[in-house]
Image (spheres, rainbow, N blue to C red):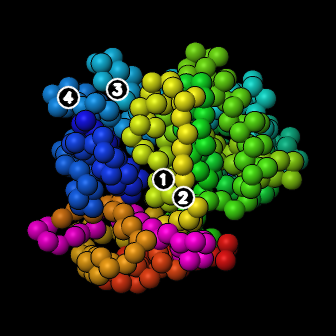
Amino acid sequence: MNFLVIGGGGREHALCWAMAASPLCDTLYCAPGNAGIAREATCLPDLSVDNLDGIVAFSQENAIDLVVVGPEVPLCAGLVDRLEAAGIKAFGPRAAAAQIEGSKGFMKDLCAKYGVPTAKYRRFRDPVLARSYVAQQTGRVVVKADGLAAGKGVLMPETKTEAIAAIEQAMIKGAFGKAGAEIVVEEFMEGEEASFFVLVDGNIAVPFGTACDHKRVGDGDVGPNTGGMGAYSPAPKVDEAMHDRVMAEIINPVVQGMAAEGAPYKGILYAGLMLTAEGPKVIEFNCRLGDPEAQVLLPRLQSDLVPAMFAACDGVLDQFDLRWYDEAAVCVVMAANGYPGAYANGTEIKGLDNLADLVDVLPFHAGTSADGERILAQGGRVLGITGLGDTIKDATARAYEAVDRIDWPDGFCRRDIAARES
Ligand code: AMP
Ligand code: GLY
């Protein structure tokens, strides 16, 4: 079969790595891909993720049997709808279902309607009303842009004055562009965070692993938020009892609610959870795998990913059983100096060959290009080095052993990924 993966980050490298290992895979393409993905797939550097016409045309011309969409932007823009209309099978939610990530207001209303626990909230299109609502609140609030903002649309003011400023930033100064024309103001939740993934076929959700990520740029969780500086799986806080609770109180009602709304959800659903004193509550939903969460989930998947994706597309997950390795996985992200602010592209990364003899290490590329034999950084997050081990501690040691063999003076990583679990 012929497959096409959309995206060019570490998540898509992990997807390509898993799909290339399937006996069902004859030809694998990735648009646009990167220098690491090029080892698993034929990269299409000129086909960008927002070129929906180009992706549909390529899929038709190359008899693609399944398109797997990595990032949220093309999902929310309706890439799956477009592919299906052209008779091409695609893995991921249609635009109407991708709204679960594309509009925080949609997500909150869905939770409210179907009794799914989440922070108390109000939606606003008028900054005057938002301000007076904030003035009435007794506790801390969180201000969120309604639309997609590349993970930056959440403001966490500590005081009322800061909360008013946050509303101004989003709604008047346009800090998040159109995404901030509408906002959600919600209650601040205390607790531990965990990410919970399920594979969904429109009606049925099958667990797809748990993970924790590290969003802040600096050791000890300081500095600005990033796309994610590292992750580990499984999330130890999600024990069996918590797992059952999340499925019963959050995942199943949302999947059934989406179907009832006429927007059945298909693909990977990623729930960002706060484990509060009152139980698990939804922080957000994402309509895709996480990055770098994919780099710790997929290496733990023992089953073939490809038939699982087909079963989700075809609505037959009731006949499906996914198997997982017991091992833990830890991914350490290496980013270009300066990230998440300004950084240089084109610096050379040496020493990747030194990893060849390490067992249980997977060096995923997130933003690289090749210049002959040389590997160059091409983006903020550049590599995601995954280690596997019997415990999170072992997996962490493996990942850092590999990181330490990489010679890239122009990059950095956090030294405390998964340290909270050791
Ligand atoms: P989001 O993009 O919605 O996942 O938010 C980014 C981060 O902001 C989350 O991972 C949390 O750390 C934090 N956050 C968002 N909403 C809340 C909330 N209501 N209470 C506490 N922290 C939150
Ligand atoms: N690492 C967070 C995300 O992919 O949304």
* Residue 411 seen in this snapshot: yes
Q: Secondary structure at mark 4?
A: loop
Give the CA distance from mark 1 to mark 3.
Answer: 24 Å
Picture disc at residue 302: 1
From the top left corner, tell me how far across and down residue 275 is, in percent. Answer: 77, 53
The residue lying at 58 percent from left, 61 percent from top is 326
- The picture quadrant where one finds residue 417 is bottom right
* Badge 1 or badge 2: first in the primary sequence: 1
Q: Which residue is mark 4?
A: 63
* Badge 4 or badge 1: first in the primary sequence: 4
From the top left corner, tell me how far across and down residue 222 is, in percent. Answer: 61, 72
Q: Which residue is mark 2?
A: 325
Q: Which residue is mark 3?
A: 89
The residue lying at 87 percent from left, 48 percent from top is 278
| Front disc: 2 or 4 | 2
Question: Are there few (<14), some (14-19), or many (20+) residues within 10 Å of tag 3?
Answer: many
Residue type at the position of mark 3: Lys
Instruction: Using the image as rendered, state which of residue 76 and residue 293 is in the foreground.
Output: 293
Q: Is mark 3 within 8 Å of ligand 2?
A: no
* Badge 2 or badge 4: first in the primary sequence: 4
In the rendered image, residue 13 lying in the magenta stretch gets the answer no
Q: Secondary structure at mark 1?
A: loop
